[in-house]
Amino acid sequence: MSASGLFPPDPDGAGDGFAERVRDAIDRQELFLVYQPQADVFTNRLTGFEALSRWRLSDGTMLPPDVFVPMAEQGKAIHLLGEWSLRTACAAAAEWQRTGMADVPVSVNLSARQLDDPGLVRMVLGVLADSGLPAANLKLELTETALFGQTQNAREALVQLRGAGVRLVLDDFGTGWSSLATLRRVPVESLKIDKQFVQAMVEDRDAAAIVQAVVAMAHALDLTAVAEGVETPEQRLFLQAYRCDTLQGFWLSRPLPTDGVPDFLSRLGLTATVPGSRAPGAEVKGAATPKAG
């Protein structure tokens, strides 16, 4: 989908016009988050959720993230979108914990432009304080491209966040420009294997070799490996054979709206009968490839 015609042109090229549109979308509740579950590859126990941004225009049109996120990254809009996403996800995860539904981390994507913001650490820690979510229950996902071009200040910000207890994940590993030297300098705890390799590995020996190599490298660096885009039982079997740690994808569940998370957790036996009780996780029973649509 092209963005032309959906939004007015930005005459100064600074991204201010689109930032105003994002602010309006937040006020009008056009923007919302969905949450995709993650589970242990072997036990199938729930390990967390990834928060994903969605935008439904006033006429009902769904604007794909691969359209509006790159537009936001061109200017100031990404800071509005990023902070809104973080606040919304942390508030949701804190509510799951407070009500005893689930005590699992939520992952939020962090862009390269956000990483260069000198106020990033203050903003993240402020959101955690406002929501009451423990820092260990927040994961920030960064792309290889963001890490490759990071400044010294950005690297220090990541170290400060990790020191405060926030967990860091390297997203879409294998598609960017990461080096082993970069991995040594940044305190990430997990590598997420890009879905293009995961979805091709059953039929493509090269893709399978890449997945196996990334898992082995992650473990050698004392990191965990997360496979994205898992859609079939066969893919899960391959991941088990390669000793991958965590899976995420349609085989487990499509991304869930906020009001769909309690039902999902209830089906897993996660909803507590006593408010405030904690449940560390439950087996995802009957997971299967969902129907398209």
Image (spheres, grey):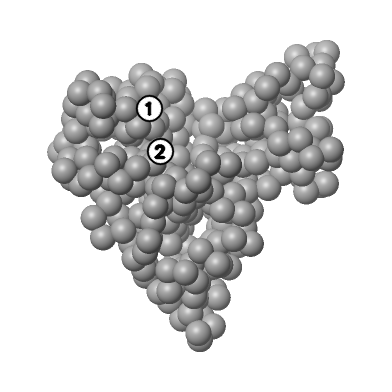
Q: What is the number of the mark on residue 229?
A: 2
Q: Quadrant of the N terminus?
A: top right
In which quarter of the view is residue 222 placed? top left
Asked if the residue under mark 2 is in contact with the one under mark 1, i.e. CB atoms within 8 Å, the reply is: yes
In which quarter of the view is residue 65 placed? top right
From the top left corner, tell me how far across and down residue 57 is, in percent: 79, 37
Is 203 on the left-hand or right-hand side of 136?
A: left
Quick one: 204 or 36, which is closer to the camera?
Answer: 204
The residue at which mark 1 appears reads as 196
From the top left corner, tell me how far across and down residue 105 is, in percent: 44, 57
Q: Secondary structure at mark 2?
A: loop
From the top left corner, tell me how far across and down residue 92 is, in percent: 59, 60
Is 165 on the left-hand or right-hand side of 22?
A: left
- Tell me, yes or no, if residue 27 can be seen here: yes
Q: Secondary structure at mark 1?
A: helix
Kind of residue indicated by mark 2: Gly
From the top left corner, tell me how far across and down residue 234 is, in percent: 27, 42
Q: What is the number of the mark on residue 95?
A: none
Kind of residue indicated by mark 1: Gln
